[in-house]
Amino acid sequence: MKVMVFERGLSTAECDILIKGEKVEQARGPKKHLKRLNAPKAWMLDKLGGVFAPRPSTGPHKLRECLPLVIFLRNRLKYALTGNEVLKIVKQRLIKVDGKVRTDPTYPAGFMVSIEKTNELFRLIYDVKGRFTIHRITPEEAKYKLCKVKRVQMGPKNVPFLVTHDGRTIRYPDPLIKVNDSIQLDIATSKIMDFIKFESGNLCMITGGRNLGRVGTIVSRERHPGSFDIVHIKDSTGHTFATRLNNVFIIGKGTKAYISLPRGKGVRLTIAEERDKRIAAKVAGQ
């Protein structure tokens, strides 16, 4: 009996427990490491820069939808050369994410990052190639952020509340706000300033899939009960594409965006169009 158990690769203690007929339960805990090859492509880490990548702490954003502060400060802004220098920067309480000081170097930054020491304000937005781009914004725009509504429910004592994509719970929202709408949130007070309905004609950004980072207006929505709803979108150049409903983030009413967009304005060009644009810029510079 004991030999058969050993063949399964168990330790002596586990064998004794199995023979006695007791259940084996061992603590596992959360994962603490992330291999570099398994890190999201949006982080743009080089393959030969080491075996491991910084694993984001648990927080408001999913692992594959965020950028840890250590990558933001070291790899993108070049304000630090090593992870140890990043630790010294954040421990001085110089970095704010969504208006709150964050001292964890692997904190998962999502949409708003500010550095008061240098008076710099950033939004983390995907570019049309699916990479996180560091987009500088004005102090006026830094006062608010957009949040996608994930759930609208009734809580204890019939208190209505909604849950946003970054884990916020907001009580007593406007009854007109539904799932998939976007809200304009005041960062200082965490109050809803305005909301944008998920409906045809409104401006949206794609946050997942092969069209990641593209911006366009909603044309139509196909409902598929039991499967994924499909949304058809047209960009400013007239190109149409389709994606799943879960990947659509509303960013403006009509064609007016509530947030400033990075270079390219969310329009994906073909390889030939990119080449022509480069040649034209080169000729203009001569």
Image (cartoon, grey):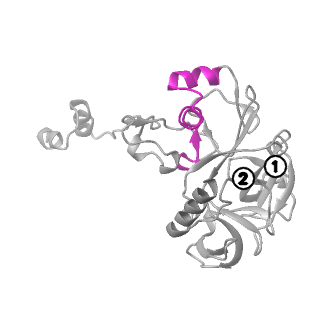
Name the secondary structure under disc 2: strand
Percent position of residue 45, x then y: 46, 42
Disc with the residue nearer the chain's start (2 vs 1): 2
Say which quarter of the image contains residue 49: top left
Nearer to the camera, 192 or 209: 209
Magenta run includes residue 79 = yes
Nearer to the camera, 160 or 82: 82
Percent position of residue 242, x then y: 59, 74
Asked if residue 250 lies left or right of residue 177, the reply is left
Q: Quarter of the image containing the C terminus? A: bottom right
Q: Main secondary structure of the magenta part?
A: helix
Asked if residue 229 lies left or right of residue 36, the reply is right
Task: Report which residue position mark 1 lands on.
Answer: 185
Say which quarter of the image contains residue 71: top right
Amino acid type at image mark 2: Thr
Q: In the rendered structure, are the residues bearing label 2 and label 1 in contact, judged by CB atoms less than 8 Å apart?
A: yes
Nearer to the camera, 222 or 109: 109
From the viewer's perspective, is residue 148 above or below residue 123?
below
Magenta span: 62-91
Percent position of residue 60, x then y: 64, 43
Asked if residue 12 lies left or right of residue 207, the reply is left
Magenta run includes residue 9 = no
Q: Outermost residue toward the left? A: 3
Q: Answer whether residue 154 is visible to the viewer in this image.
A: yes
Amino acid type at image mark 1: Leu
Task: Name the residue located 38 percent from the left edge and 34 percent from the top edge.
Answer: 50
Task: Report which residue position mark 2 lands on.
Answer: 164
Q: Which of label 2 and label 1 is nearer to you?
A: 1
Nearer to the camera, 153 or 182: 182
Name the secondary structure under disc 1: strand
